[in-house]
Image (spheres, rainbow, N blue to C red):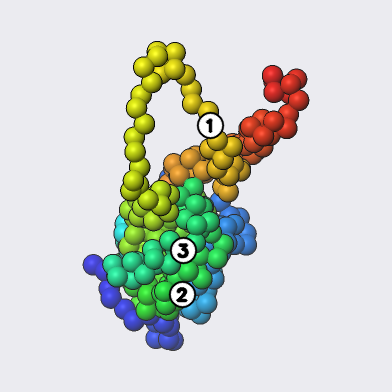
C-alpha cells in the first residue's frame, strides 16, 4: 500500500542506501550524462524540478533512469503512473499528478493564442513556439508547474522522503519524453493533443468577403466551348505565396512512438527534403527557374 508523505526531507527520514535489483526490459534513458532532453521545453521541465531544491534523491533518480530501472510509464490527462524496480522483488508504484488548468483558464489561453498567428501555425505543425510561456503569462497562468504544490507525487516504497529516487527517475525520463512529444506538457495540464489542435484550428482567421449584399449572379454561358473554358485569373488570385513557416508540418503532427529510441526522429530525417522541395516549388511558381532546371 502506498504511503502518503509530506514533501521534503529531514534526518528522521533517512534509510540505509540499498542497491536496486537488475531490471529486465526497462526504459533506459538515452542520456548518458548531462541533461535529459535537448529541446528548450524538456530543459524547462528539468529546471522546474531542480529549482524546487528537493534534495540529492534527484541524483539517485538520474542513475535509476540511465540504468533502465523504470519498467513502464503510463501518461494520462494530469497524471503519470509508473512502475520502478527497486531493491525489492516487487516493483514500486509511482504516481505523479500535475494540477490541471480549469476550463475557463484554457479559454483565456486560447483567446491569447488566437492573436498569435505564428504560434498557432507552429503548434498545428507539431512544434512548441519558443515564447509560448509569454502567452500563458499574459493570461496570468503558468504553463509549467510554477510551484511545488502543482505536483503531487507518491510511491509505494518505504522511503518517507518525497520525492524519492523512484519518483525522480520517472521525472527525468519524462524530460526525454518532452523531446518526443511537445504536447506532453499540455496533456499534463489537462488538455489532450487532439482537443488542443481542434481548438487551434477553429481559432485560425477565416477570410470572408466584406459584403455579399447586392451581388447579382451572372447567367451561365450557353455555348459549350465558353461553358467549359477556364476563366481569366486575376494577378492576386493566389494571394501571398511563401514557404510554410514550419517544415515537415504534417509529419510532425503525426507524432512519434512513445519513448522512441531510434537513432534519428522521422521528422528530422525528412526535414531537409521538405526544405529543398519548398524552395524549389516557390521558385518554380514565381518563374525563377530555368527551363532545364524545371524539367528535373
- Describe the element under mark 1 as helix, strand or loop: loop
Residue drawn at x 43%, y 83% is 9
Give the quadrant of residue 217. Answer: top left
Give the labeled residue for mark 3. 115
Q: Can you tell which mark lies on residue 138?
A: 2
Mark 3 or mark 1, earlier in chain: 3
Mark 1 or mark 2, earlier in chain: 2
Q: Position of residue 148 (x, y in %)?
A: 41, 78
Q: Position of residue 234 (x, y in %)?
A: 55, 35
Quadrant assignment for the C terminus: top right
Mark 1, other Cα within 10 Å: few <14 / some 14–19 / many ≥20? few
Q: Can you tell which mark lies on residue 233?
A: 1
Front one among 234 and 201? 234
Mark 3 or mark 2, earlier in chain: 3
Q: Nearer the viewer, mark 3 or mark 1?
A: 1
Q: Is 53 on the left or on the right of 195, as rendered?
A: right
Amino acid at each position: 500500500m502506498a504511503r502518503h508523505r509530506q514533501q521534503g526531507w529531514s534526518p528522521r527520514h533517512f534509510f540505509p542506501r540499498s542497491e536496486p535489483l537488475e531490471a529486465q526490459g526497462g526504459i533506459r534513458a538515452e542520456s548518458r550524462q548531462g541533461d535529459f532532453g535537448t529541446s528548450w521545453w524538456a530543459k524547462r521541465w528539468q529546471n522546474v524540478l531542480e529549482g524546487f531544491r528537493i534534495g540529492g534523491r534527484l541524483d539517485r533518480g538520474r542513475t535509476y533512469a540511465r540504468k533502465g530501472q523504470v519498467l513502464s510509464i503510463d501518461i494520462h490527462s494530469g497524471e503519470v503512473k509508473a512502475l520502478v524496480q527497486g531493491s525489492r522483488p516487487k516493483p514500486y508504484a509511482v504516481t505523479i499528478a500535475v494540477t490541471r488548468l480549469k476550463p475557463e483558464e484554457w479559454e483565456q489561453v486560447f483567446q491569447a493564442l488566437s492573436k498569435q498567428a505564428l504560434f498557432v501555425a507552429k503548434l498545428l505543425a507539431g512544434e512548441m513556439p519558443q515564447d509560448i510561456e509569454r502567452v500563458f503569462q499574459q493570461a496570468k497562468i503558468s504553463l509549467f508547474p510554477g510551484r511545488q504544490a502543482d505536483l503531487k507525487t507518491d510511491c509505494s516504497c518505504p522511503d518517507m522522503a518525497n520525492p524519492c529516487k523512484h519518483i525522480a527517475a520517472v521525472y527525468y525520463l519524462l524530460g526525454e519524453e518532452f523531446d518526443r512529444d511537445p504536447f506532453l506538457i499540455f496533456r499534463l495540464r489537462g488538455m489532450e493533443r487532439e482537443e488542443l489542435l481542434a481548438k487551434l484550428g477553429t481559432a485560425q482567421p477565416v477570410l470572408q468577403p466584406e459584403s455579399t449584399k447586392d451581388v447579382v449572379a451572372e447567367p451561365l454561358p450557353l455555348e459549350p466551348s465558353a461553358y467549359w473554358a477556364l476563366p481569366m485569373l486575376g494577378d492576386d488570385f493566389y494571394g501571398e505565396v511563401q514557404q510554410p513557416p514550419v517544415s515537415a508540418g504534417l509529419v510532425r503532427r503525426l507524432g512519434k512512438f512513445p519513448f522512441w529510441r531510434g537513432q534519428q526522429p522521422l521528422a528530422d530525417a525528412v526535414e531537409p527534403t521538405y526544405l529543398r522541395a519548398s524552395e524549389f516549388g516557390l521558385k518554380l511558381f514565381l518563374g525563377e527557374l530555368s527551363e532545364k532546371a524545371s524539367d528535373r
